[in-house]
Image: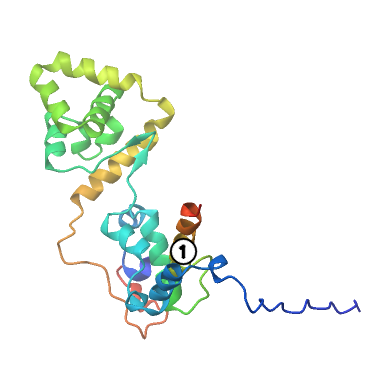
Amino acid sequence: MHEYGWSITEAMSTPLIQAFALYAAINARYGNEPKGPTYLDREIQAILKNRNDTAP
Amino acid sequence: MAKPTKRKPLTKPAANADPAAFFTQEEADKIIALTHGPQSSANPAAVLEAFIKGGEPLVAGGYTVPSIGLGRYMLIEAIKSPVLEPGGWEKMNNTQFAELLFVCLQPEAVSRSLLAKGPEAFSAAVSEHADGVKLSALQELGAAIGIRLAQAFSTILAPSEKKTMTPATAPGAATASAGG
C-alpha cells in the first residue's frame, strides 16, 4: 500500500469487496494469472445459475 | 516406469443431439454479449456495485452501523461524548459509551425526541438499549463507530494526496513511495 501512497487508516477502512476488486486489477496489470474465478467467470456463472433456478 | 495411461477417446456428440439440453439461445446470447459484445470492455457489474454503492454495510455485534452525517454528529455533540476530544476513547466510561452507541445506532429522530423530553427519558432509553448489547461485542462496536467517524471526516472531494504510479516504475522502486 505504501507504493500507492495510502495511509493506514485509509487502507484499513476500505471495504473488503473493494479491496478484492483492486487486488484483481493489480494482478491483471502485472499480467499475473488470476486466482479463482474472474469477474467475467462469475457473471457467466450467475447467468447459468439463474437459468437453473428458473428451470422447471 | 508406470504403464502409460490410456486417454479416453473424445466422445463426439451425436449428430442429432438436442440443443435445448445445453444452452438456450437467450443464455448463449447473454454470455456472448458479455464476452464479445459492447459490455466486454466495461467494468464488471460486481466491481461497479462495490465502488458506487460504497461497499458492504458496516456490521458489528449484530447491528448495522450507519454512516455519520451532520445530524448524527450534532447529536454526538449534544450528549457531550468524550469521543470528540483527543484521547477521549480511553477516558470513556460505560455510561458514555452506551449513550454513544444509542445515538449511533438508533435513528436520529428517535434520539432527538428523547433528548427533547429530558435527560431522564434519554437515559432510560439508553439503558433499555444497552440491555440488549453483548459485552463481547463492545470492542467491535467501538471500532465500527471509530471507522464511521474517520469516514465522516475523510475528504472525498478534496484533491487526492495519493501518488499516482507511473507505468514505467518497477513495483519495488523506492522512488515511488518516497514520503508516502
Give the residue at mark 1.
Answer: A42
Measured as percent of width and height from the top left, residue B115 is found at 12, 22
* Picture colour scheme: rainbow
Name the quadrant of the N terminus of chain B: bottom right
Picture residue at 58% right of the left edge, 70% below the top: B18
Residue in front for this viewpoint, B161 or B125: B125
Name the residue at 26% across, 44% down.
B148
Residue B162: give x, y in percent of width and height.
26, 68
The percent coordinates of residue B36 (x first, y second) are: 40, 80
Q: Name the residue at 20% across, 48% down.
A: B152
Q: In this view, does A54 lie to the left or right of B92?
A: right
Residue B65 drawn at (x, y percent):
29, 39
Task: In the rendered view, tell whether residue B32 sits above or below residue A55.
Answer: below
| Type of amino acid under label 1 | Arg
Q: Is mark 1 on a helix, strand or loop?
A: helix
Label 1 resides on the chain identified as A
